[in-house]
Image (cartoon, rainbow, N blue to C red):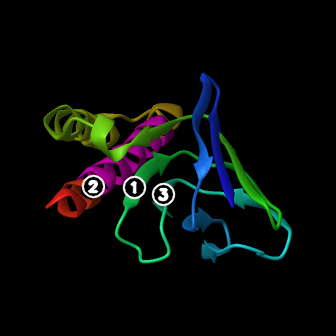
Amino acid sequence: MRFELITLSGVKLDQHMYSAIIPTIDGEISVFPSHEPLVTMAKNGVIAVTYEKDGDTVEYFAISGGVVEISQERIRILVDEADHGDDIIEAETKAALERAVRLRDETDDQVEREKAHQLVDRHLVRLKVAELQRRTRR
């Protein structure tokens, strides 16, 4: 089964895979070969991609919300941004999370508070992906 992860800056991943776990607005879904066709909305979260049936090779991606299109031969996910677990620098993400939390807690402006909430969510997901990827490498 083909797995395509496409961001605003281009194709992030396009390769054969065995299964994927995808965060959707209705909850996480697991997709395997010959999955029933589906179009749904992705939400901020973690995508786990398994390349072999034995499950030894798993990669993790932090995504922003987007659109998921599933057919029996392919999964195509269109998102604003996606980060591979190996590309996330934990120290930088932790510092960014602290700044976002501080901004959220200190601002009186509703628009700025909402932006800060989104940044907090984004950085929490990125930290989770970095941790999952680090555990997988051990």
| Residue highlighted by disc 1 | 59
Residue highlighted by disc 2: 133
Count the marks: how many? 3
Q: Residues within 10 Å of mark 1 (few under 14, many from 20)?
A: some
Q: Residues within 10 Å of mark 3 (few under 14, many from 20)?
A: many
Pointers 2 and 1 in contact (CB under 8 A)?
yes
The residue under the point 28% across, 43% down is 105
Residue 1 falls in image quadrant: bottom right
Taking 43 as reference, is 41 left or right?
Answer: right
> Nearer the N terminus, badge 1 or badge 3?
3
Q: Is residue 124 magenta?
A: yes
Image quadrant assignment for residue 56: bottom left
Q: Toward the viewer: 104 or 44? A: 44
Q: Range of the magenta residues? A: 114-130
The residue pinned by badge 3 equals 45
Label 2 neighbour load within 10 Å: few <14, some 14-19, many 20+: many
Q: Secondary structure at mark 2?
A: helix
Earlier sequence position, callout 2 versus callout 1 = 1
Instruction: Tell me: residue 74, above or below residue 98.
Output: below
Give the residue at x 48% y 57%.
Answer: 45
Residue plotted at (61% across, 34% down) = 80
Mark 2 to mark 3: distance in Å? Answer: 14 Å
Amino acid type at image mark 2? Gln
Which residue sits at x=44%, y=48%? Answer: 62
